[in-house]
Amino acid sequence: MNIKLLSASLFLMATYWISLKVPAMHMVFYPTLGAFCVLFTTRSFERIEIVKVIIGAAVSSVVGCLFYFIYPGALSILLVSLLVMWANKKYKLNAPPIMAIALIPFFSHPQHLWLTPLFVFLSLTSLFVLIGLADAAARHAVKLPFAQELRKKYLFIKSVKTR
C-alpha cells in the first residue's frame, strides 16, 4: 500500500471524527474532501500546482457563499457554476472538485457562511502538508537499509524515486 494513500485515508477518518464533534463541518468535508484526497495522492503535481488548486478551492468557496448569501436560488447556482468553470479553465486548475466546493452552501445551508471558506482552506492545507510529509517519509524510508526487506515482507512501502 502506498504511504500517501494510507495517510490520506487516515486524514479522512480523522476529519470525519472531527465532523461528528462539529456538525457544521460535515457537509464541508464529504464527499469533496475525499475527491481532493484522490486528486492529491494519485496525480504527480508540482507543489505550486497544488497551492493553486487550494487557492482556487478557497476562492470558489467564497464565491459560492457570497452568491448564496445574496440570493440562494437557481440563478445563483448558474452564475457560480459559470464563474468557477471559467476560472478553472482560465487558470488551468484541472481540479473538478473545486466545482463541488463552490456549491456546498446551496446544499448544506450553513448557519455561518464565513466558516465554509475557512474550513475548506484549512482542510486542504492540512491535507497538502500531510501528503507532503508522507511523500518525504516514503522517500526517506526507501533509503533505509531494511526498507527492501520490509517491502518484500509486507508490501507496505511502495518504492519511490529519490530526487
Image (tube, rainbow, N blue to C red):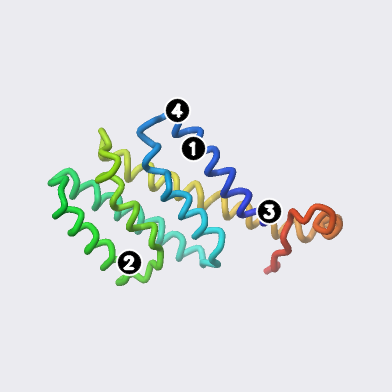
At 69% from the left edge and 55% from the top edge, which residue is drawn? 1
Residue 73 place in picture, x, y as percent: 15, 48
Image x and y of residue 97, in percent: 39, 57
Report the residue marked by disc 3.
137
Q: In the displayed image of the protein, which residue is found farthest to the top?
A: 21
Residue type, numbered disc 1: Tyr
Secondary structure found at label 1:
helix
> In the depicted view, which residue is nearer to us: 96 or 146?
96
Q: Which mark is residue 21?
A: 4
Marks 3 and 1, the one that precedes in the sequence: 1
- Image: 71 above or below 99: above
Quarter holding residue 148: bottom right
Residue at image x 84%, y 54%?
153
Helix, strand or loop at mark 2: helix
Q: Nearer the viewer, mark 1 or mark 2?
A: 1
> 61 or 55: which is nearer to us?
61
> Which quadrant does the C terminus fall into?
bottom right
4 or 2: tag closer to the N-terminus: 4
Q: Element at badge 3?
A: helix
Left or right side of 13 for 90: left
Q: Nearer the viewer, mark 2 or mark 3?
A: 2
Which sits earlier in the primary sequence, circle 1 or circle 2? 1
Disc 3 marks which amino acid? Ala
Give the mark nearer the N terminus: 4 vs 3.
4
Inter-mark Cα distance, 4 to 3: 30 Å
- Residue 92 place in picture, x, y as percent: 37, 71
Question: Mark 2 — residue?
Answer: 88
Q: Nearer the viewer, mark 3 or mark 1?
A: 1
Query: 10 Å neighbourhood of mark 2: few (<14), some, or many (≥20)?
Result: many
Residue at mark 1: 16
